[in-house]
Amino acid sequence: MAHEDFYRSILKLLVYLRRFLLETIIALACLVFIIYWFAPDILELLQYHLDQKLAFFGVMEPVISLLKLSTVTALALMAPWIFFRLSQGLILLFGITRRFAFLFSVAALMLFYGGAAFCFFVTLPFGVNFLLGYQSQNLTAVISMGKFVDFVALFLLGFGLIFELPLIMSLSCKLGICHPKTFSKQRRYAILVIAILAAVLTPTPDVLNMSLMAIPLYLLYEMGIIIGRLFTPVS
């Protein structure tokens, strides 16, 4: 009976994921179509915020760049619905309570938007100013529209997802997959991984800009340990 219940739960989850993917694709396509008409204004806002003038080097580059920007914006706007649907999937797979699923979706949303906002207001301005600091009287940067959109989108989404670290840690403790003591014992390795991530994901190699990502990530790791202790089942 236990095996039958397990397979039945997996089947329900697969059906749910299929429906979730179809709904996501349809909703994303509709949103991208709508947002595309406002994409030039969004691009202008990014240019103003980062104080950059752009150029394009291909006939299709503006169209493709605006489509990419529209897609990223649509994903950001769909984040509440995406996290809610993921939380419902957790109910099907692990049988967690609806209260915990609601808290999960709210926390995921706050962390995602918090990470993206931190990148937008802190990391990106520092990184762009540093990278363009090599300009001189005889050396002027000409920034491609496509490269600019890729660069900004990568870091905004990357920071939003990276900031989900404490939530993932807490969820693994809640489900009994891992224990807070394990995270505590592996702290030195976590610091090493965080330092590597900061070096890879931040737009500049200087210590100050890397610290802007590494320090919040480490604090989030410690937060994950603390919250994980609250959700760890008492044995």
Image (cartoon, rainbow, N blue to C red):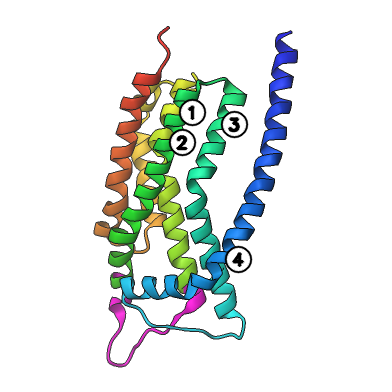
Q: Residues within 10 Å of mark 4 (few under 14, many from 20)?
A: some
Q: Which residues are magenta?
A: 130-147
Image x and y of residue 74, in percent: 52, 58
The residue labelled by disc 3 is 89
Question: Considering the numbered disc 2 on the image, is that residue within a helix, a strand or a loop?
Answer: helix
- The type of residue carrying mark 4 is Phe
Residue 228 as seen in the image, left or right of residue 97: left
Please tell me which of labels 2 and 4 falls first in the chain: 4
Note whether 44 is above or below 22 in the view shown.
below
Question: Considering the numbered disc 1 on the image, is that residue within a helix, a strand or a loop?
Answer: helix
Image x and y of residue 71, in percent: 55, 62
The residue labelled by disc 4 is 33
Quadrant of the rendered image containing residue 20: top right
Instruction: Give the residue drawn at x 33%, y 43%.
Output: 217
Image x and y of residue 115, in percent: 36, 49
| Callouts 1 and 2 close, C-beta under 8 Å | yes
The residue labelled by disc 1 is 101
Task: Identify the mark at residue 69; answer none if there is no mark.
Answer: none
Question: Considering the numbered disc 4 on the image, is that residue within a helix, a strand or a loop?
Answer: helix
Q: Is residue 55 visible?
A: yes
- The type of residue carrying mark 3 is Gly
Residue 201 as seen in the image, left or right of residue 21: left
Instruction: Give the residue drawn at x 49%, y 67%.
Output: 150
Residue 11 as seen in the image, left or right of residue 37: right
| Callouts 1 and 3 close, C-beta under 8 Å | no
- The type of residue carrying mark 2 is Ser
Q: Residues within 10 Å of mark 3 (few under 14, many from 20)?
A: many
